[in-house]
Structure formats: C-alpha cells, structure tokens
C-alpha cells in the first residue's frame, strides 16, 4: 500500500517526545512492506534528523516551525496557527497524492483534514477532552466556570475532528470507551503503544535512595506540574524518613521553574535530555509518576517497568496501562500514601524485587512491538477491504 503519514511531531529514534519514538517505530516496520510518505512538523534545528527517516520513506514533506524559548501568549498563538497551517498542508497532500491510506498522528493534526475517497485513520495518542474535563471537575469558583467553558470548546473541537475519520486508534480501552461516550457511532480500535524500545540487557547498580521522574517538559506543562507537585508535597515526606534521598527530574526542555530547584536544593538533579535512558531508569531505586490529570498511556511508566525499576504512580497514571496495583506497581493518589509507597520500596528489598520482575513481565506480555504491528495491520486490512 501507498500510505501517507501525517505527524504533528517529527518521528525520531532519539526523540524528546515519546510519541515521536512510537511513530518512528511504526514507520520503520511498515516500510518493510508498504510505500511510506511522511508529512511532519519539525523545528528548524531538526533537519539533520530527517536522514534516519529517508531510507524508510519514499517521500518526506517537512513543515517547519520556529523554536520558542518560552511559552507566552504570542508563542501559544503562533503555535496554534502553525498547527492549522500544517493540517491544511497535509490535507492538500492527502487529496493530491493518490494514496491507498492516510494515517494522522495526534488529534490536533486532523483539524483541517477533510474526508475524501481515501480511507483515513486517526492515531489519537491522547483523548484531549479528558484532561479538560478533569481540570473542570477539580476547579472551584470562577476557575470552575472558565474550565467549564474550556471543556465544552475542547470537546466540540475533538468530536468534530474524530468524526471525519474512518477509524480512530486509541492506545487503551479506557480511551476507547471515553470516545464512544462522546460519539457512539465512531469506529474505534485499540492498538497499544510499544514499550521498552530503548531498554537493553545491560545491568547497572542501583543508586541507593534515588527517585526518578523522566518526562518531556518543554511543551507539556502537566509534566512540569507533576514534577513540582512531587517535589513540594511528597518528597519532603520521604526526606523526613530518609534525609539523604535524591530526586532526579530528567527529560527534555525543563523550564526555569524546574532548573532553579537544582540550584537551591542539593538533593535534586535536573539534567535535561538524557541520551541513555536505559541506564537512567536502571540506576534509579524508584520511578515516581505523580500524574495529576492523565491523558493516554504514560509511556515513561511502561519504559520504567520494562527496565525493571519499581514504579509508584496515581490512578490516572495507571488507568490506560492496566497494570495490577500491588503486583506490577504501586498506586497512591494522595501525598501521604504516595510517600508511604515510595518508602516501602526503598525499605523492603523483597517488595522491590517482586515489582521489578512482575513489571518487566507485564510489559513484555502486553506491549511488545510485534503485537502492536499486528494490530495496526489488522486495522489497515479492514479499511482497504471496504
């Protein structure tokens, strides 16, 4: 088949965005049997990254945008217009390229796409209405009113987009059910994201009492909020018991509010982008994921499980993953419970070992790349037959 991929973020093997790595692996595997064309947004400094994609793609159509040093109102407006421009550009390619199939990555990329004769698939990654609903429910007073307005706008926006596609792919059954509540007529298929792609057989000695949170921060305020929430509300409770505990806030694009924590607190390290995440995960005693809102599957949790690092997260963090609390990871939704779970792992070697073994096996069983590719090919075959 001749397939056009429309990707809001540049697919890369070494990506600052977890979804970017996922799309790269999908393209890499599909290119063995299909002719892949790629339209992708990329920053001005990312052109060199196209070289690893060229052997996989018949044609690449880049759509550039300028890197914003900060995210003020003007930068956000410029980003929205860039999304619109890219979606228009991709729609023109889809209409004129005589493709057998068009696959759009991320909901926002489909905003200006129009339904034609070519079958179209939306790989949603996240259901963007869900965090908006939760923000509304958590807010009070005037903020609740403002969040209610925002929720209605986002829900209308997402529903209008997903209705244009023949099939919508979600990463979890939870998100599939959520979309069906928004519109029961949608054809939604669940294809989980592959996990542990950068995890090797190498072994590293654990750094005692080291807590890790690894995420992308530059364009993900929710990740910044989660890191700060852990540092301000949970980490002090851990330190009361283990004063020498260390907290590593790793990942791409930490803003000043995170970077400044390292300057003030010797117990915190903010290294920025980590090139060898395999080593980063395996050296940590515990991976903490204090997810406050939730979206789709939190890929970094899966990667930590694949690395054999015990995980503590919230119900929101585990909702799309479906791991068994107490067997594969620990779940706690309040600061005291979260700190207690972290301290249990740090203090109980048998528990840490059990979670390490079970977490690794859980990922291997449910989130292998082979299973993902079979699911994707099944979606394609169903669409092309019709």
Image (tube, helix red, strand yellow):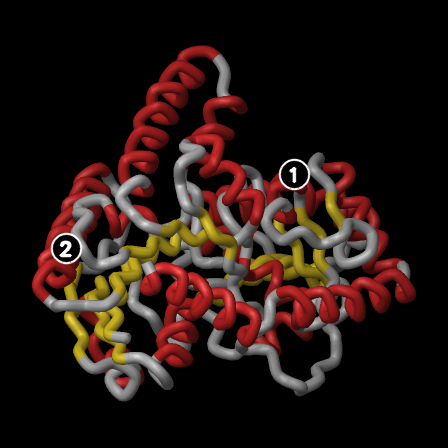
* Residue 383 point in image, percent of width and height: 35, 59
* Residue 229 point in image, percent of width and height: 58, 41
Image point (40%, 22%), residue name: 147
Q: Quadrant of residue 18?
A: bottom left
Could you tell me which quadrant the N terminus lies in? bottom left
Q: Nearer the viewer, mark 2 or mark 1?
A: 2
In the image, taking residue 135 as reference, residue 115 lies left or right, namely: left
| Disc with the residue nearer the chain's start (2 vs 1) | 2
Could you tell me which quadrant the C terminus lies in? bottom left
Image point (30%, 83%), residue name: 56
* Residue 210 point in image, percent of width and height: 70, 64
The residues tagged by marks 2 and 1 sit, at their Cα atoms, a distance apart of 46 Å
* Residue 379 point in image, percent of width and height: 42, 62
Q: Residue furthest top?
A: 141
Q: Which residue is mark 2?
A: 91
353 vs 127: above or below: below
Q: Is residue 46 visible?
A: no
Q: Which residue is mark 1?
A: 233
SS at mark 1 in the image: helix
191 vs 100: above or below: above
In the image, taking residue 273 as reference, residue 360 lies left or right, namely: right
Q: Residues within 10 Å of mark 2 (few under 14, many from 20)?
A: many
SS at mark 2 in the image: helix
95 vs 84: above or below: below
């Amino acid at each position: 088949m001749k397939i056009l991929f429309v990707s809001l973020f540049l697919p890369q093997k070494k990506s600052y965005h977890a979804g970017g790595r996922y799309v790269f692996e999908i393209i890499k595997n599909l290119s063995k049997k299909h002719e892949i064309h790629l339209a992708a947004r990329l920053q001005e400094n990312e052109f060199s990254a196209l070289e690893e994609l060229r052997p996989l793609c018949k044609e690449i159509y880049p759509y550039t945008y300028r890197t914003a040093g900060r995210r003020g109102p003007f930068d956000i407006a410029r980003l929205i217009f860039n999304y619109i421009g890219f979606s228009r550009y991709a729609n023109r390619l889809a209409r004129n390229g005589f493709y057998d199939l068009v696959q759009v990555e991320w909901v926002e990329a489909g905003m200006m796409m129009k339904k034609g004769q070519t079958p179209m698939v939306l790989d949603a990654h996240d259901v963007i209405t869900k965090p908006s609903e939760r923000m509304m429910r958590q807010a009070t007073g005037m903020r609740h009113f403002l969040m209610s307005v925002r929720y209605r706008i986002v829900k209308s926006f997402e529903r209008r987009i997903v209705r244009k596609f023949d099939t919508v792919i979600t990463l979890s059954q939870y998100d599939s059910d959520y979309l069906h509540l928004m519109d029961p007529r949608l054809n939604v298929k669940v294809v989980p994201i592959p996990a542990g792609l950068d995890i090797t057989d190498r072994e590293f000695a654990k750094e005692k009492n080291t807590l890790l949170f690894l995420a992308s921060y530059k364009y993900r305020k929710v990740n910044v909020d989660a890191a700060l929430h852990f540092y301000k509300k949970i980490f002090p409770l851990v330190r009361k018991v283990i004063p020498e505990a260390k907290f590593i806030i790793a990942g791409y694009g930490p803003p000043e509010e995170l970077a400044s924590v390292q300057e003030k607190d010797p117990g915190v390290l903010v290294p920025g982008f980590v090139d060898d995440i395999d080593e980063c995960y395996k050296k940590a005693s515990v991976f903490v994921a204090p997810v406050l809102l939730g979206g789709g599957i939190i890929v970094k949790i899966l990667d930590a499980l694949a690395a054999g690092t015990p995980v503590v997260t919230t119900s929101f963090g585990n909702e799309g993953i479906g791991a068994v609390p107490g067997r594969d990871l620990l779940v706690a939704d309040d600061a005291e419970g979260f700190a207690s779970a972290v301290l249990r792992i740090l203090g109980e070697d048998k528990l840490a070992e059990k979670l390490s073994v079970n977490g690794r096996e859980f990922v291997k069983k449910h989130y292998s790349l082979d299973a993902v590719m079979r699911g994707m090919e099944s979606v394609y075959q169903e669409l092309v037959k019709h």
